[in-house]
Image: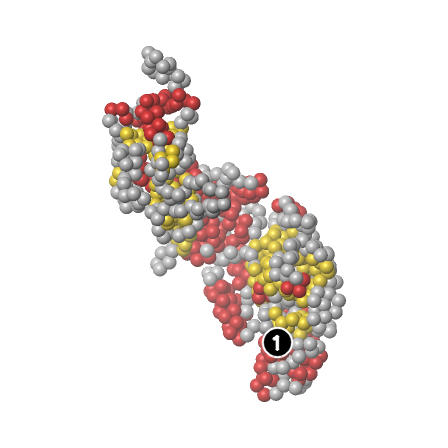
Amino acid sequence: MGKKASGKRRGRRKNQSDRQRSIMAGMTTREPATLDAPPETRSSSPGVTCRGLTVRVESADESNRTVEAVLVTDTPATVRDLRTFEILDEILVIGGADLPDQVPLYDSHPQVRFGPMSVTTDEVHGSARGMRVEGNSVVGTLHFSGDAESLRRWEKVREGHIDSVSVGTRASEFVDIPPGTTQEIGGRSYSAGPNRTLRISTVWKVREVSLVAIGADENAKIREGVDDAPTKTEGKTMNPRLRRFLDDLGLSSAASDAEAVRFLDGLEGTNRTAADAIIAAAEDAVSARSGDAAGSTNDAAGSTDGDTSRTADAVATTATVPNPAETARAERERVLAIQGLGGPEEITRHAIAEGSTREETALAILTHERTTRTAAAAPNAIVRQALDPVSHRQALSAGIAHQLGLETVRSGATDDQRREQERIAESGDQFRGMSLLDVCRESVRMRGGSVTYDRRETVRAAVSSGDLVAIFSPIVNLALQTEFEMQPDSTQGWTSETNLPDFKENERPRIGKDGGLKRLPRGATAQHASWDAIVEKYKAIRYAKQFNIDEQDIIDDSQNALRDTPRRMGNEAAQLRPDLVYSILLANAAMNQDGVVLFHAATHSNLLSGGTSVLSGDAVQDAMGAMKNQREDGRALNLRGLYLIVPPELEFLAQQITASAERGNTGSADGTLNPLRSANLQVRSDSRISTGGVVDPRDDAQLVGTATNWFLSSSQPMIEVGFVGGQRTPRVRSYTLEQGQWGVGWDVNHDIGAQALDYRGLQKSAGA
């Protein structure tokens, strides 16, 4: 080995080894799946697999109710395919893991039915977050909720009574290896046992984590301060990195660990030096993390400094050993994280020198602050109940939203969404009345940082953590989207909507002259319908704006900026659609299909003028008749006028004309019945077609109408509104100010376009 492992290290390894707990391999089930491929090469999803893990409590964080866990290893687990009821072994290829930001934490898994799992939010006791790949394992942190049922389970985990969890996964791509055969997958050889199929899941996703009495994956553990899950051997655990190194040098993959140790002892030269470096790094990792000083001292007393023999513990370790580059990077990140807390210089310096983690340093800073500050100087942000970071941010957002008069429980939400929104709103009551500066202090404290009394430093610390964006952004989104949804839109109903793939010019073809059905003689072949070569074209355009909340706004407690500016932007976004549509009516541009303007009396027969065009029952009837008589390639279209679009000056007259039971000309010999009433015409009124006009968003041109013009639209929309990617509402994106600015900002964009596709279902009257 080059040098002997010290008694201190051996003692710590012994204590580490003594803490290992063995578990039984549990049999799990999965949901049924449609597996149509041959058994040996199935590649569709086999359903949800539940894999067990053994819990340890040494990594538990009392203040945040969290515990770190090794969720999955590449060790085989026994599972059941509910479609075939076949019991098989499964290996999850760690490199194929799809790791969500968060999955729910249950008790003993939701009930598995023949179909999707059905659970309620009451069964959720927290979440698993921060999942990541480390070596041959997936590691994550379990966060427990603060309700009574979840706290009961947290106490049992913390006290060591519940020592197992189980992770549910779903594979989307896999290969089944028949019993007794070997197959190479992804450059690695896998051998199935003599009696069971071996399933190699190459692409899979974590779906949920559950507390259980007994787990199935005997190598996956709740973390005690070590980095990785081991590969189990005869009473010992061979370092996975060392084993891979030996395999690369020619060791058989089927060799036992005892044979691997003999192979290791026979190495010489640079290979021996490299192996010794891996083992030494493993020893240092275990020694640095165990922290069991008493056990180390006792073992050190019995060590023999002259003993240079290789110990079993030196080659068997539970730590995953990073390579030197990874170690250096991790150390840099640790130092930067500690410095980013902004604590007193002496605490920061001591933490870096002693190898403390960011969390340990944050606790030391918090303890220092509590013991040195006076009650009179304490910030007025007081948390009355413990919240996890995500819930904490949501509650702070809800508290500010309450102050600004924003409704956080949205209409149209599902029952589950509404319950969650109500829960967050209730949690936010404790933060009602906080200033923006108080929010900054609370966000720093939430991160475990040092809360200072310098307002500028407090703002900058909150901004740099990223939490301020997370707290303010829901308020900005809520204000903008609420205002957007509240704005009336008089174009609804008589315009259509579509999804556009991009910002390029989009073509809308029409059925050509041969579009109608033709008589087919006996034995003849039907003709193909043709499309006109001339089509209408238009582009979607991005409309955008941005705004900031900077250090000065926060110090001045300009809370209204979080509400009023987003509201204004939401209002402006809502106006884009009617602005575009009415600009098309007033611009009366030439159509691509024939080069004639949209409204033309002679060519399109859709423009009324003169004294008979003034809004009246007779004029509306004339427009409806002209629309019904529109023809295409000699065919009558019989389009029905349904929407009467007028300026505000004509709104009440339009209501009288369309809704009255009788006509005003009672002396008519033909009777007084008003036929427009039974036509169910819908009146739309908008000031954009009046003398005030509208600014065309496409080119900022000012277009004006008159107080007497009016329009009629058919029940079949002639104007199309397109949205890129199907996004009907504006998008909001947050960012942090940089380069001499301190604060947060948001940009808003709305991607939309509109075009008249045909003239036949539109009529215009000049009205005078």
- Is residue 238 depicted above or below 68 in this figure? below
Quarter of the image holding residue 236?
Answer: bottom right
Image side of residue 702 versus residue 163, left or right = left
Which corner quadrant holds the C terminus?
A: top left
Quarter of the image holding residue 164?
Answer: bottom right
Image side of residue 491 versus residue 125, left or right = left
Instruction: Name the residue type under label 1.
Output: Arg
- Is residue 404 depicted above or below 137 in this figure? above
- Is residue 264 depicted above or below 379 in this figure? below
658 and 731: which is toward the camera: 658
Question: For numbered disc 1, what is the local secondary structure?
Answer: helix
Residue 317 at x, y = what percent?
Answer: 65, 73
Residue 388 at x, y = what percent?
Answer: 56, 52
- Residue pushed farthest bottom? 269
Q: Is residue 521 visible?
A: yes
**Residue drawn at x 37%, y 42% as measured from the top left:** 513
Residue 637 at x, y = what percent?
Answer: 39, 34
**Residue drawn at x 66%, y 64% as measured from the top left:** 40
Image side of residue 129 versus residue 744, left or right = right
Q: How many marks?
A: 1
Q: Residues within 10 Å of mark 1 (few under 14, many from 20)?
A: few
Q: How is the image coloured?
A: secondary structure
**Residue drawn at x 41%, y 54% as measured from the top left:** 735
Residue 117 at x, y = what percent?
Answer: 65, 49
153 and 129: which is toward the camera: 129
Question: Which residue is label 1 attached to?
Answer: 244
**Residue drawn at x 59%, y 76% as measured from the top left:** 281
- Residue pushed farthest front? 522
